Image (cartoon, grey):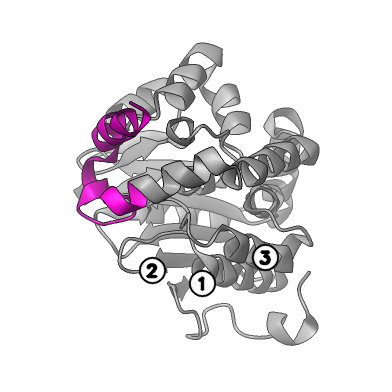
Amino acid sequence: MSNDRETQVPVDAGDYRTLRVHRDGAVLTVEIAAPPMNLLGPELVHDLVSLIQRAESDAGVQVLVFTSADPDYFISHVDVTRIAAYRAEAARLTGEASIALLFRYLSASRLVTIAQIEGRVRSAGDEFVLACDMRFAALETAVFAQFEAAFGQLPGGGAVQHLTRLLGRGRALEVLLSADDYSAELAERYGWINRAMPGDQLEGFVQRLAHRIASFSAAGRVAIKQRVNAISLAPVEDFRYDSDQFGESARTPETQRLYAATLDAGFQQRETELDLGSWLGTEVQNDAD
């Protein structure tokens, strides 16, 4: 959990390695900047933990807006070469080495969180935005996916819990089993996100909404969010189960073999992942053959 010294650091202090934080009254805009493609690695998880700790300790902060400095990638996915390291960083907040529990902690927080999505957001990146309270995406550039099935894995960061509740059984199975990319337009139609809109309107809309929400009673926000979570947010045990299953499968010889083969072929490289859904459908199938 947080320590007293760290939580006294101003929430918008400039000591994050992968986040750029700007405060405007009760609204904190957090820009993700983790080159070369915003992979979720230990540095980004470390900074997210610090940010959450500091924001929760500051009664003046009410709303967090997450954006990306990279127009092509919001959060691409986890760095599969550093799974143990980023899970250990998550334990600083929850006491357990699990990004699923870190993300669920964010969902249960008093803070209202909004994801302003441009570019690709896949697997754990998608699970991060699903953990946010609201998701708004650029029609032209936002791409969504859960590709764990291509590696023989169960998503470990909460996707099964969120997508089944948001999309319904059939569409959740389509998304989770296809391991394919989905456009912002289709994501909106499926209920994956709140709205898709032209990219040149996105920031203005999100900022207006964030400041409107922040202007109302804090007690009302907390009460509403607690009741909605009580109805719709899966229990901690369900997130823990999925996280444990992902961690175990990541260590199996078959998954390790698939990680190694795809990394050699271009996985986790910026240009390859621009069209990852199609690439995985070809590359993993060829490897299996």
Q: Indicate the position of residue 201 as horizontal and vertical percent values.
A: 24, 47
Label annotation for residue 23: none
State the residue position of label 3.
88
Q: Indicate the position of residue 128 as horizontal and vertical percent values.
A: 52, 49
**Which of 62 and 6 lies nearest the eye of the viewer?**
6
Label annotation for residue 43: 1
Query: Alpha-carbon distance for marks 1 and 2?
Result: 8 Å
Q: Is residue 224 magenta?
A: no
Q: Residue at x 58, y 63 (%)?
A: 86
State the residue position of label 2.
34
**Which of 12 and 213 lies nearest the eye of the viewer?**
12
The residue type indicated by label 3 comes to Ala
Check contact, mark 2 vs mark 3: CB within 8 A. no
Q: Is residue 16 something that shows in the picture?
A: yes
Query: Alpha-carbon distance for marks 1 and 3?
Result: 11 Å
Q: Answer with left or right where residue 241 lies relative to residue 113.
A: right
Element marked by disc 1: helix
**What is the span of residues highlighted in magenta in the rendered image?**
262-289
Check contact, mark 1 vs mark 2: CB within 8 A. yes
